[in-house]
Image: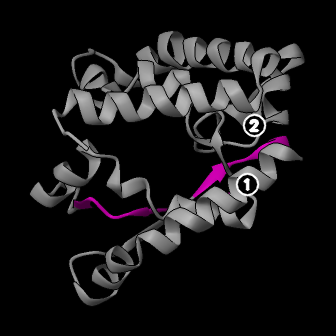
Amino acid sequence: MIKSIFDFLFATVIIFCLIPFWIIMIIVPTFTIFKQTRIGQFGKPFTIYKIRTMHSGKVTSVGKFLRKFKIDELPQLFNIIKGDMSFVGPRPDIPGYYDKLEGSDRQVLKLKPGLTSLAAIKYVNEEALLKRQKDAKQYNDDVIFPDKLQMNLDYCSKKSLTYDLYIVGLTLKGIFVKNKISI
C-alpha cells in the first residue's frame, strides 16, 4: 500500500515538473507516443506508453538520444498513475515470456512491472548485446530472460521502499554518471 501511494505521488510530482516537456511533446510532430501490449501484474496484459524512437525499422538520431537518457520511457509515468506499473519492478515484457511462466517462477507475476529494476540496470545495453549474437532470440530465451527472471524473483523477497529507493538511485547514477551529466 505504501509503495502504491509513493508511486502515485512521486509520478504525479514528476509529471507536473515536466509540464514544459509534455508541451514540447504535443507541439513537435516528430514526437509521437508508441503503444504496445505488455504483460503486467498477475499476467494481465496492459498498454505501455513510450516515445516512438524508430521509424521504418530504424532508430532515429533523436531516438538514440532519447533512449540513451531513458527519456523515451517518461510516458510510463502515466502507466504508474493508472496503477499498471511501479517505479521499481520487473520491466514489462511482451506476451510470450512472463505470461508463460510455470511453478514457483510465477511468483514474479505478483509484482507490478517497473520503470527500473536491477535486471534493467544490468542489461542496460541489451539491444547491443543481442545484436552481437548469432541467434538473438535464442540468446535472449536461454541466457538473458532466465537471468532477468532470477533477479526479479530475488527482488520479490527483498522488496521494500528503502530497497526501491536504492534501485532508483542506482538507475539515476547509471543514467547521469555513465552519460557524464552533472546535476
Residue 137 at x, y = what percent? 42, 25
Q: Is residue 48 visible?
A: no
Give the residue pinned by disc 1. Answer: 45
Q: Position of residue 158 (x, y in %)?
A: 76, 16
Dot 1 crowding, Cα within 10 Å, few <14, some 14–19, many 20+: some
Instruction: For the residues labelled 2 and 1, say whether their Cβ atoms are less than 8 Å apart.
Output: yes
**What's the colour scheme?**
one colour
Element type at marker 2?
helix
Residue at screen point 36% across, 29% down: 173
Amino acid type of the residue tagged 2 in the rendering: Asp
Residue 160: x %, y % from top left: 77, 27
Whether residue 134 appears in magenta in the rendering, the answer is no
- Does residue 115 lie above or below 134 as drawn? below
Where are the magenta residues, as a range? 37-54
Q: Amino acid at mark 1?
A: Pro
Q: Split into 4 quadrants, where in the image is the C terminus? A: top left
Looking at the rendered structure, the number of numbered marks drawn on it comes to 2
Q: Nearer the viewer, residue 87 or 97?
A: 87
Residue that mark 2 sits on: 99
Of 97 and 104, nearer the camera is: 104
Residue occupying the point 28% across, 20% down: 129
